Amino acid sequence: MDHVAVGSGTGAGEVETEVVVVGAGQAGLSSAYHLRRVGYVPDRDFVVLDRPPRPGGAWQFRWPTLTYGRVHAMNALPGMELTGADPDRPSSEVIGEYFTAYERAFDLRVRRPVRVRAVREAGDGRLRVETDAGVWITRALINATGTWDRPFVPRVKGQETFVGRQVHTSRYPGPEAFAGERVVVVGGGTSAVQHLLEISRFASATTWVTRREPVFVEGPFDSERGRAAVALVEERVRDGLPPQSVVSVTGLPMTEEMRRARESGVLRRLPMFDRIVPEGVVWDDGRSVAADALVWATGFRAAIDHLAPLRLREPGGGIRMEGTRVTRDPRVHLVGYGPSASTIGANRAGRAAVRDIRALLARTREGARRDEQRVERIISPSHGSVAVRETAAR
Ligand SMILES: Cc1cc2nc3c(=O)[nH]c(=O)nc-3n(C[C@H](O)[C@H](O)[C@H](O)COP(=O)(O)OP(=O)(O)OC[C@H]3O[C@@H](n4cnc5c(N)ncnc54)[C@H](O)[C@@H]3O)c2cc1C
């Protein structure tokens, strides 16, 4: 991979820039677009680093039966519409091609595959971004790493004894892989429902298990509902708590297919089981279900382990934010996190983060300029260079 130096060099293998964007999904591309729009030059003023081999963010890894027609409400990226896509094609292909065209149209020069391993203090007020392709020293960071890279599976007693297959949504192979099997699908979100509906056409038996009673919501998922859901997640993030799952605030929007599945019994739900045994799952009240496969549609967590050295977390376990800015560290913005974890939210977050970072960098530049002026005033034959070094180091 080509990872020539951008900006200007510092230590061996280190490259200076103004802004590093980590991740090139909807949130990262939206941020890069807005950086470009306000005059930042890619490969000089900012750089976008993305782990996967191709454009598409997490969409490129989604299963083939998640066709473009089945995604809820995919908002286009700013500045370029996604038109005329075939609803029967896999969303991984449609969105992969769209992102490719987008990156090219706005010349965003995303660097991939580049995995950010850690972000820490550089020691001079800037941040040090360590990757498997070199080190970047930056004044600000837009973190747009989504959740796909951190699948979540709850711990259940006996899990390791199960002799069948266990698959998380992030590795879901499509329904044909479960032909003739007895399958338990765990999870109360849209992914679980979609897995269940399609697996039930191939499997010999399906069982649906959720922690809480699912809430089916009639009527369209309109902007008012969307706003209400975002407000609830925002409140938690403001309080320094981890953002909760989307479905816990939106409910499950009812479709015609779901209505039919409900009538046929496929969507009959059981509470979470208490134990896993080699041949299936067991409840403490004596019930049990034999299974060949367990499908964990139990969601994701924010993929932000690389930010751990910055100690951004509050005692409540979450990261307190004002808009997209991390309260504990104004150099760091999280986009596509919590309330902005949707395609529309990611678009808005990208714009807000860039506006804020621009103001921050202007303030730091102004501060640096004032320092320089102070240094110049102090340079005089009577003070000499010692006084200059002392002032500059303050
Ligand atoms: C199954 C599923 C279906 C969905 N359907 C919809 C929908 O219909 N409509 C909707 O609005 N939203 C939907 N969402 C939510 C959707 O994923 C988000 O709205 C949006 O696409 C996420 O964009 P993002 O840029 O935040 O994350 P991503 O698309 O995940 O992009 C993050 C990028 O950062 C990369 N990355 C992660 N860690 C690192 C690292 N350390 N170093 C470098 N790169 C890194 C990732 O590999 C990825 O390329 C869905 C989510 C799921 C799981």
Image (spheres, grey):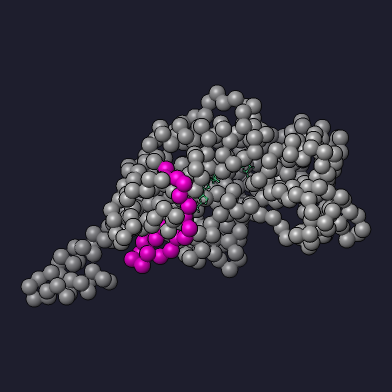
Residue 68: x percent and y percent?
A: 62, 31
Question: Residue at point 58% right, 61% down?
Answer: 318
How many numbered marks appear?
0
Say which quadrant the C terminus sits in: bottom left
Q: Seen in the image, is 198 located left or right of residue 141?
A: right
Say which quadrant the N terminus sits in: top left
Figure quadrant, ligand 1: top right
Q: Seen in the image, is 23 located left or right of residue 318?
A: left
Looking at the image, the residue that sits furthest to the front is 163
Question: Residue at point 83% right, 56% down?
Answer: 278
Residue 326 visible within the image: no
Q: Is residue 114 magenta?
A: yes
Looking at the image, the residue that sits furthest to the left is 381
Residue 204: x percent and y percent?
A: 85, 39
Identify which residue, 273 or 252, lies in the foreground.
Answer: 273
Q: Seen in the image, is 328 located left or right of residue 239?
A: left
Identify which residue, 357 or 117, lies in the foreground.
Answer: 117
Q: Quadrant of residue 242?
A: bottom right
Question: Residue at point 42% right, 43% down?
Answer: 110
Above-or-below relation of 102 to 13: above
Looking at the image, the residue that sits furthest to the right is 286
Question: Residue at point 74% right, 39% down?
Answer: 177
Q: Is residue 174 magenta?
A: no
Q: Quadrant of residue 367?
A: bottom left
Residue 186: x percent and y percent?
A: 76, 49
Residue 329: x percent and y percent?
A: 45, 62
Q: Seen in the image, is 242 located left or right of residue 130?
A: right
Q: Quadrant of residue 36?
A: top left
Residue 112 visible within the image: yes
Which range is magenta? 110-129
